[in-house]
Amino acid sequence: MKTRLLALSLIIVLLIAAGCSNTNLNNSDNAGEELKEKDWSDITELAEGSKVRIFMWGGDEGINRYMDEWVAPNLKEAHNIELERVPMDTNEILQKLSTEKRANKEEGTIDIIWINGENFKNAKEFELLYGPFSEKLPNYQNYVDTESLDVQYDFGTEVEGLEAPWGKVQFVFQYDEEKIPTPPANFEELKDWIKENPGKFTYPDANDFTGNAFLRHVLYDAVGGPEKLLENGYDEKVLANHADALWSYLREIQPSLWRNGETYPATLTDLDRLYSQGEVWMTMGYNEARAESLIKDGIFPESTKSFVLDSGSIGNTHFLAIPFNSPNKAGAMVAIDFLMSPDAQLAKYESTYWGENMALDPTKLPEDAQEKLANMDRGASVLSPEKLSESLLPEVDAEYVNWLKEHWVNEVVQKQ
């Protein structure tokens, strides 16, 4: 009897050890490397029944509803994975990961981060990300144009499998059609309109993602298009030759801005509030369909429409990445693959929640998904796919973002 009890105890110990080994396979540095060699079926089995925490910007209610009301329950049903959305600005996420990296904290609390641009460049440089992993994902292989430059590069930084594309957005202006029957067609007309309608236009601070994008459009126009900015990556010589035109334009419109340009909205949310209250007659954003949910919620007037300037509008791809010390790398991979599925991407495309463009190549979608996409009405405020496509401008090196942040205050704000 004692011998049988001893044998049974030994079996239990071995099973517990095996379970611990399986958990470690998902968590430790060595486990992360071993995970890359596993078949996808094994990864999904590891992820089954686990919890995934996604840290992401939480400033858009439509995006939050998409994650909470569509993604979370459908991910639970498809893979028995519990998704927890944690709202946090990306720079704070990277600060947290940097602190954990310095402290050699091998198991953190973040499984997925929403990231792109300079944040990705910094995260890659300081080795804050796990990977490469994107090529393991079936939906990446099946539905993404993996040869596309906006998938291979993120603001000029080579992706190298450290993040997976989640969506594509394009910068547009929103305006109240009842107050502006015909919006400006170019930057010269925009300048004239601002002067003719003092106080009815402004843009967010250069440190804000949207405000910086507006400034990059002015920079493109001052340089004569993005080509010169793309030729050699970050090029101080090009800036030296064209910076005066950029700053002169911004200084010229400043006295006619909201509150005489003495202060600027800190965030896009602040600018949207001014627009919704009628203090300004235009807002802007890095999502061609963002106005639809705001109109439906009664925040924006029903007469809101969108426009882009003849010089074009910047578009980019944003991504999902896994931190170096994610406690659930298998779960993160399965969740990211789910977020890249045709169903999830089509739900995101609908203006009910988010309304942004897909990361997938429409020509690679299954026939039923292609039909659904063709019949989808994104709303009256959204420009046609043809207009957006013909207006699309590429992003440039993320260092230009930093340059605008560093110089805008001295060259514009303090020159008043």
Image (cartoon, helix red, strand yellow):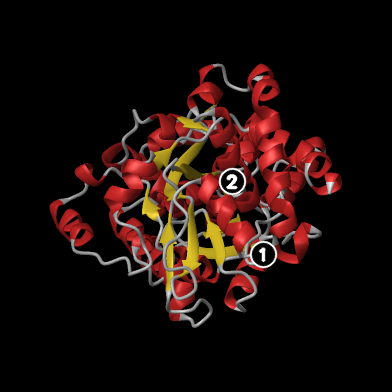
- In the image, residue 371 sits, relative to residue 278, either above or below, namely above
Which dot, 2 or 1, sits closer to the camera? 1
User: Which of 169/270 is in front?
Assistant: 270
Residue at (68, 59) in percent of width and height: 88
Q: Residues within 10 Å of mark 2 (few under 14, many from 20)?
A: many
Residue behind mark 2? 213
User: Residue 416 location in percent, x, y?
Assistant: 84, 49
Residue 129 at least partly seen: no
The mark nearer the N terminus, 2 or 1, is 1
Q: Amino acid at mark 2?
A: Ala
Looking at the rendered structure, the secondary structure element under dot 1 is loop
Left or right placement of residue 372 versus residue 82 in this view: left
Left or right placement of residue 98 versus residue 314 in this view: right
Looking at the rendered structure, the secondary structure element under dot 2 is helix
Q: Amino acid at mark 1?
A: Pro
Residue behind mark 1? 198
